[in-house]
Image (cartoon, rainbow, N blue to C red):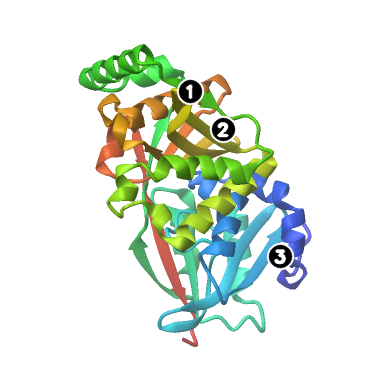
Amino acid sequence: MTYVPISSCRMSPFEFEQRLHAFDEAVESTEGISTFCSGSDWILAANDTLHSARSMHLWERDDHWMACAMGELTPFTRVLQPLEMTWAFGCPLVGSDVSSRISLLLDVMREPNLFWQVVMLTGVPEDSVFWRELQQRLSGYYSYEVFEGAHCIQSEIHDGPDDFLQRRSSKFRANLRRSDRQAVSQGMEYDWVTDFSDPYRLFERMMSVERNSWKYNTGRSIFLIGRYRAFYEALLHRLAANGRLRLLFARWDGQDVGYVYGGVLNNVYRGFQLSYDDNFSSLSLGHLVQWQMIQKLTEEGVELYDLGMVMDYKKRWADRTLRLLNVVIFSSYT
């Protein structure tokens, strides 16, 4: 294979937007990472709404990509960092071949005139060939520190809803089925959104439910924080535009009373938010919309449900934890 100098691999943000399909294919081929949160929808929505005063730095060589931004990260002023740094789920270095990914990284770090002080890699799978080889190839050339990342809790759904449910506790199954029967008897219906032509209206439908939730009325809703609301709205718009949005509403007497919202990339679904009208808390409506979503996803062939950050209430839905690391690499001139 002919060596391609790193200077020839740079691209502009505009060029990156034109090649998002190829980038997402590289993400899908990368083993062990948080797939959706390394993909273009998540990282670009985050870059546009959550992070300011940064410049994008993007490289691609032989279907291997590094998507980063240069900006301040106290106490350093020139940190090459992932496009999404708020939760740091995604890996900014993607592609199918481990050695090629690491070679791309090392060549980027040697690029003249980049003048970086720190390179930050997030979403590095803890138990992976990539991490083991990266340590070997950094050793002796760069100093680095490793920090625990934001782990993701996940569930396999490739074997269908019945097998998924069978892996839950008997108490969980009994409670879910009882709530389902009760909700149906009281006239609860579910609206699986397939028309994405008006994302503004879809987001407002979500917010109309959110405003009646216990989270919103106790000041705990993430949508009460302006920049997070902007992020999830921008993400919804991106997903609606490319058909990767997954949104389900629970409806009672003609009104939206619950929702669950997420996105898909290849055969992975990543859940973002769910909420429900507090007047229906006795029906375990949060569980019911989650269960409805899982059944719909399995019908379309989705194989993995990523529930996001590890939290106790999610564990009853999960089969495993994807453990991730953050790696901070220091320039020899820092």
Residue at point 77% right, 55% down?
A: 18
Q: Which residue is mark 3?
A: 13
CA gap, disc 3 and disc 2: 27 Å
Give the percent coordinates (x, y) of residue 8.
Answer: 77, 69
Position of residue 6 measured from the top left corner of the image (x, y, whole percent):
71, 70
Marker disc for residue 114: none
Q: Nearer the viewer, residue 50 or 142?
A: 50
Per the image, label 1 sits on a secondary structure element best described as strand
**Mark number for residue 267?**
2
Mark nearer the N terminus (1 vs 2): 1
Amino acid beneath label 2: Asn
Question: Based on the displayed image, in which of its 4 quarters is residue 155 positioned?
Answer: top left
Name the side, left or right, on which 299 lies relative to 307. right
- In this rendering, would 20 be left or right of 302? right
Q: Is residue 170 visible?
A: yes
Residue 32 place in picture, x, y as percent: 48, 44
Alpha-carbon span between mark 3 and mark 1: 39 Å
Q: Give amino acid for label 1.
A: Tyr
- Precedes in sequence: disc 3 or disc 2: 3
**Residue shown at 51%/51% (left/top)?**
232
Q: Residue at 52% of width from left, 58% of height from top?
A: 230
Secondary structure under tag 2 reads loop
| Residue to which mark 1 is pinned | 190
Q: Residue at x 55, y 63 (%)?
A: 49
| Crowd class of label 2 (few under 14; some 14 to 19; many from 20; radius 10 Å) | some
Amino acid beneath label 3? Pro
Q: Secondary structure at mark 3?
A: helix
Q: CA distance from mark 1 to mark 2?
A: 23 Å
